[in-house]
Image (cartoon, rainbow, N blue to C red):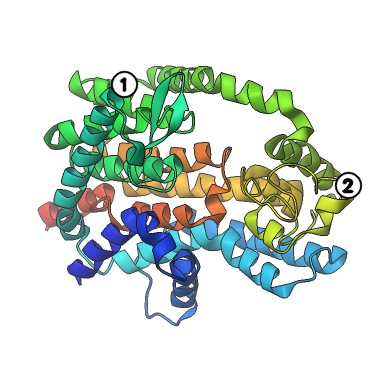
Amino acid sequence: MYHIFYILFIFLVTENIYEDSISGLNYFDEVIAIVALCYLMLPHKKYYTHSSPEKKSILCIMGVLIIGCISTLVFHIQSDFGGIWRDVIAIMKFPICYYAFLQISYKYKKKYIQKSIIKFAQVYTFCIGLIGVLNFIKPIEVFTGGYRYGMPLYHFIYSHATFLISTLIILVSVLIANGVRKNKMPIILGIIGIILTFRSKPILIVVFISIMLILRNKNKLHSISKKQFITYGIIILALSLYFASSQINTYISFGESAARGAFYIYGFNIAYTRFPLGSGFCTFASTLSHKYYSPLYFDYNMQNIWGITPDDGSYAGDTFWPNIFAQYGFIGFILYLLMLFYIYKSINNRFIILSDQWIAAMSLLLYTISAAFAESFYTNATSVIFALVLSIYLGENSKQTLQTDHKNLDS
């Protein structure tokens, strides 16, 4: 069975490379989400975790779905049922996959699952990072996706730098969870590979990991006070905003004439005018709402905006949060944020705070939040990959292992 987890991991981090070559492969995330949902609906003699935060995250996403069903029936903006049911799957797949595969993984020794993939993660990360450095020195067309600031934008052999970044965040996180000290070189090369994409999205994670590694190297991690922890958090946020400020200013300057600005501006308007329900499934700021072209785009005269015209949907999934507060209203937006908060609580319950595994899990979760400002992260295929890695591939739950060891000592 551990060989299946090994093959699944390799598939998850390389799927984008050959996605266009295999027909139907781009639907793998929907298949996995449906499998996860079916698993949770089957009768079980017992669940392997009864963690309150995990159950609450599912209740929150169910609340979002209920609001979506009501607003869809009330306003009936999207008439194509194909778009509606696919949007239902899309909005719930991140928390559902996290919860379901966390249940499934409790049947197996996660340390063996992690052990089976670690050599691949080390070699693959090392190769990507090393090629990135060589490509920076002497750019090679197949590895380069254009130039910024006169420097080559690294994307390795992925279709876009976004997919390379997601892959490297996953690989580096898995290596950190396995142990920072014994994986130091591939971790550093992985971070260099991320930096060489010259994208603003992963800056938050690079800064977060770098600070954690510096503190770990100085053996100060376990002696940090709550005040210092908050200070480091503010530093991470400030540095991230600084590096992303030029990109943010660009989006603001274009306003409603560009897809991302229009999504935020009109998204708030939709949430306000259709308070508190929102506009319903498959109606705004998503690739599905473009595929099943939403009437709202005509209502707000957005059909002529580059990237979200009826014939061109290249920017239809260029952000995520307007999709939530527009389609499910401000109540649905709050419920979705609560869902993410409970997954954060779940991570805290699973791992010892500030341990290698906790840093790895937090890096993954922080990236999902950061990426959601620049892509429809939680409704695309990458969210399923991150959910599976968070639930399966970071090793044994350190708090549970610690509690088991104490019980064995007591007995």
Pick whichever, 211 or 206, lies toward us: 206
Q: Position of residue 368 (x, y in %)?
A: 48, 43
Image position, residue 316 (x, y; %): 66, 49
The residue labelled by disc 2 is: 273
Hey, what amino acid is under mark 2? Thr
> Residue 358, can we see it?
no
Local secondary structure at mark 2: helix
Which residue: 27% across, 48% down? Answer: 399
- Side (left or right) of 30 relative to 73: left
Residue 367: percent from the left, percent from the top?
A: 45, 39
Circle 1: is it few (<14), some (14-19), or many (20+) Cα within 10 Å? few
Residue beneath the point at 71% across and 40% down? 259
Residue count near mark 2 (Cα–Cα under 10 Å), binned few <14, some 14–19, many ≥20: some
Q: Is residue 3 above or below residue 304?
A: below
In front of the other: 118 or 195? 195
Tell me, yes or no, whether the two marked residues, 2 and 1, touch with CB atoms within 8 Å.
Answer: no
Q: Quadrant of the N terminus?
A: bottom left
**Which of these two is toward me, 268 or 304?**
304
Residue matched to label 1 = 224
Which residue shows up at 73% across the image and 54% down it? Answer: 328
In the picture, the quarter occupied by the C terminus is bottom left
Disc ID at residue 371: none
Toward the viewer: 210 or 315?
315
Q: Secondary structure at mark 1?
A: loop
The image quarter in which residue 115 lies: bottom left
In the current view of this chain or complex, which residue is farthest to the front? 141
